[in-house]
Amino acid sequence: MVGRIAAVLVVAQFGVFENPNAKARKSTPLIVVLQNEASTGPSTVIVAPLAKKSDVPANDRIVVPVEIDGQPFVVLFQSLAAISKRLLTKPVANLDDQLLDKLPRAIDYLFLGM
């Protein structure tokens, strides 16, 4: 494209947002961005849904417990999805302090069974 510059939206890794899918919001009210800002494409990002901890049996390897504003949630790593960055408008929290060390273990277990 000559003369055009594509705008790139930057979405912070481990940023938490309201689930943009209204139908899914009842069971998974929030989503967390897992993809690092350096590796994102111009329009999509990899996310995982968050469910209330009481709704999902815990499995620390793939269903990772986190806390947001004192409320217990779990990250459902087995339900990864790519979504448009445009759907992520207002972050409600950031989980970098809770997920930085847990992400590699969950991804290894999800894809390698280790």
Image (tube, rainbow, N blue to C red):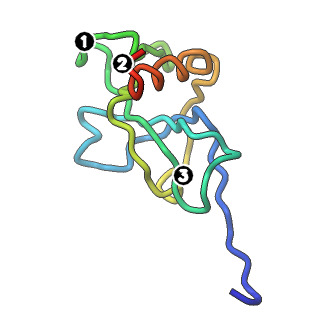
Q: Residue at x 23, y 18 (%)?
A: 55
- 87 sits left or right of 101 in the view: left
Mark 2 or 3: in front is 2
Mark 3, residue position? 89
The quadrant the C terminus occupies is top left
| Dot 2 or dot 3, earlier in sequence | 2
Q: Residues within 10 Å of mark 1 (few under 14, many from 20)?
A: few
Quadrant in which residue 12 is drawn: top right
Measure the C-alpha gap from mark 1 to mark 2. Answer: 8 Å
The numbered dot on residue 102 is none
Mark 2 and mark 3 residues within 8 Å of each other at the beta carbon: no
Residue 17 x, y percent position in the rendering: 48, 40
The quadrant the N terminus occupies is bottom right
Q: Residue at x 48, y 12 (%)?
A: 70
- 14 sits left or right of 61 in the view: right
| Dot 1 or dot 3, earlier in sequence | 1
| Dot 1 or dot 2, earlier in sequence | 1
Q: Residue at x 47, y 55 (%)?
A: 87
Question: What's under tag 3, amino acid-wise?
Answer: Thr
- 64 sits left or right of 5 in the view: left
Mark 1, residue position? 57
Mark 1 and mark 2 residues within 8 Å of each other at the beta carbon: yes
Question: What's under tag 1, amino acid-wise?
Answer: Pro
Quadrant in which residue 26 is drawn: top left
86, 108: nearer the viewer = 108
Mark 2, residue position? 63
Residue 57 x, y percent position in the rendering: 24, 12
Residue 67 x, y percent position in the rendering: 48, 15
Q: Residues within 10 Å of mark 3 (few under 14, many from 20)?
A: few
Measure the C-alpha gap from mark 2 to mark 3. Answer: 25 Å
SS class, disc 1: loop
